[in-house]
């Protein structure tokens, strides 16, 4: 692995951090879980093999006890709330959005409240009160009401914006949504991770990896396996559970 020119920059960056006595933090969010599937089994097996905690963003309206039973055998998996039904309510000429200003505010907040209630009722202590908006989009005016709805954290994609609750964003998406719709080029992903590591080193957010197990091609699975292998070989890395990050965000907001 260390001789692979694609991965060598990451290996060297991690070695520098280890010499400096600094630990790099990672976390993993995977979106759109509903039912047990072979792809979910593959994700849970892979993350379990490398002791990588994974946060599954689960669609409340479309899931049931079958997923609960599967996750009972995956203690390293946590469950967040992925909107309500992952249904687009925006007009055709606008970006897809479930949690936008296209419906009455009360209706959107009602959906979020019942999504939180359903996921918590199904998954118990495995569930975390974190909202993951479908398509990573939410109307900004709704964010201030998330706390009173029962949420402690929000997670979208990109740089975090100030909010009244903990914001724990992902910042490296492995999928090429606007091109092949498969995995992005591995070399580009490695450099994106290194860029985020350097940002984190300067006091920014940890590396938040975003995956979508249901649409992974073989290149995506290979990338994850190699990333987990590289990070497992050094004490300079830590893959954090989402509850740790939510706790930190709450403390910072006090």
Image (cartoon, helix red, strand yellow):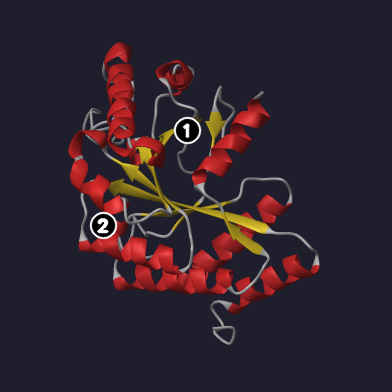
Decide if residue 180 is in sight here: no
In the rendered view, tell whether residue 72 sits above or below residue 60: below
Q: Which residue is mark 1?
A: 154
How many angstroms separate mark 2 from mark 1 (CA)? 23 Å
Q: Secondary structure at mark 2?
A: helix
Q: Would residue 86 appear left or right of 51 to someone viewing this image? A: left
Label drawn at residue 236: none
In the rendered view, tell whether residue 125 sits above or below residue 151: below
Quadrant including the C terminus: top right
Q: Residue at x 23, y 28 (%)?
A: 89
In the rendered view, tell whether residue 106 sits above or below residue 154: above
In the rendered view, tell whether residue 163 sits above or below residue 189: above
Q: Residue furthest bottom?
A: 3
Q: Which residue is mark 2?
A: 214
Q: Residue at x 56, y 70 (%)?
A: 232
Decide if residue 27 is in sight here: yes
């Amino acid at each position: 692995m260390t001789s692979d020119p694609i991965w060598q920059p990451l290996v060297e960056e991690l070695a520098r951090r280890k010499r400096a006595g600094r630990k790099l933090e990672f976390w993993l969010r995977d979106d759109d879980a509903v039912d047990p599937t072979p792809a979910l089994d593959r994700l849970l097996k892979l993350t379990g093999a490398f002791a990588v905690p994974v946060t599954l963003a689960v669609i409340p309206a479309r899931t049931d006890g079958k997923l609960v039973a599967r996750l009972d055998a995956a203690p390293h998996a946590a469950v967040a709330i992925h909107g309500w039904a992952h249904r687009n309510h925006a007009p055709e000429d606008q970006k897809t959005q479930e949690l936008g200003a296209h419906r009455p505010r009360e209706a959107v907040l009602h959906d979020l409240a019942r999504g939180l209630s359903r996921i918590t009722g199904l998954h118990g202590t495995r569930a975390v009160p974190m909202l993951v908006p479908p398509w990573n989009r939410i109307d900004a005016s709704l964010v201030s009401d998330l706390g009173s709805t029962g949420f402690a954290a929000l997670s979208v994609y990109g740089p975090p914006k100030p909010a009244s609750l903990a914001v724990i964003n992902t910042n490296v998406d492995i999928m090429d949504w606007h091109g092949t719709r498969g995995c992005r080029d591995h070399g580009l992903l490695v450099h994106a991770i290194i860029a985020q590591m350097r940002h984190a080193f300067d006091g920014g957010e940890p590396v938040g990896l975003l995956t979508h197990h249901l649409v992974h091609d073989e290149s995506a699975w290979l990338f994850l396996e190699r990333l987990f292998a590289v990070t497992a070989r050094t004490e300079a890395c830590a893959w954090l559970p989402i509850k740790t990050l939510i706790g930190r965000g709450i403390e910072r907001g006090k």
